[in-house]
Amino acid sequence: MTKKEFIESKILDSGKLKQQLTLWRFKDKKIVFTNGVFDLLHLGHIDYLGKAKDLGDILIIGVNTDESSKRLGKGKNRPITNEKSRSTIIAALNFVDAVVLFNEDTPYELIKTIQPDILVKGADYKPSEIVGYDVVTAKDGKIETIEFLSGYSTTDIENKIKKM
C-alpha cells in the first residue's frame, strides 16, 4: 500500500466506519470524536486535534461536506478548499485514525452512529450546548472542550490574503 493509499484508507464511508468501530470496541479502545470544516489547515487546527487525540486512543474526525459547509454561513467563498482536499489533508495527520464526511447541518446522526466515549469541541461552546451532548452523556461518556490557540483561524488567514 502506498502512503497515499494509506491516507485515503482512513477516509471511511458509513459501512467501513461501522466495521472499524466494531474492531475498535472489541479492542476496548477509547474513541474520541470531533468535527469541523477544517478549511485551510493551520496551527490552530493541529493544536486542537492533537489535544483531542490525547484524550483517548482513537480520534475520529467528522468533516463537513462542501454543501454542509456552505450552509454554515462562514462566507460566500467558503469552503476555500473542497471536501476531498480537506478530508485527505486531515487523514494525512498521523494522530488522526479516521475521517468521515457528513452532509447534514450538524454531526448529530454521525455521533449517534459512532457513540464516542469522548466528544470534543472548542471552548467557545458550553458542554450542554454541544451537538451530541445527549447521546454521549446517556452512555456515561465525557464532553470535553479545548481552548483555541490564539491568533489562528481560517477567517483571519482569508482576510489577510484578501488584503494582499
Image (spheres, rainbow, N blue to C red):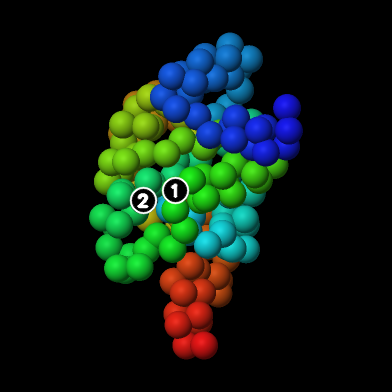
| Residue 88 quadrant | top right
The residue located at (70%, 42%) in the rendering is: 94
Number of numbered callouts drawn: 2
Q: Is residue 112 left or right of residue 156?
A: left
Q: Is residue 27 visible?
A: yes
Residue assigned mark 1: 83
Residue kind at label 1, given as amino acid type: Glu
Q: Percent x, y for residue 112?
A: 35, 27
- Residue 156 vs 21, above or below: the answer is below
- Residue farthest along the bottom direction in this orientation: 164
Q: Is residue 140 visible?
A: no
Q: Nearer the viewer, residue 26 or 18?
A: 18
The residue located at (30%, 49%) in the rendering is: 67
Label 1: element kind? helix
| Residue 63 quadrant | top left
Q: Percent x, y for residue 117?
A: 49, 29
Q: Percent x, y for residue 152?
A: 55, 70
Label 2: element kind? helix
Q: Which mark is residue 66?
A: 2
Residue kind at label 2, given as amino acid type: Asp
- Residue 15 vs 82, above or below: the answer is above
Name which of mark 1 and mark 2 comes first in the sequence: 2
User: How busy is the neighbourhood of tag 1: few (under 14 within 10 Å), some, or many (20 plus)?
Assistant: many
The residue located at (51%, 15%) in the rendering is: 19
Q: Percent x, y for residue 81?
A: 47, 58
| Marks 1 and 2 close (CB-CB < 8 Å) | yes
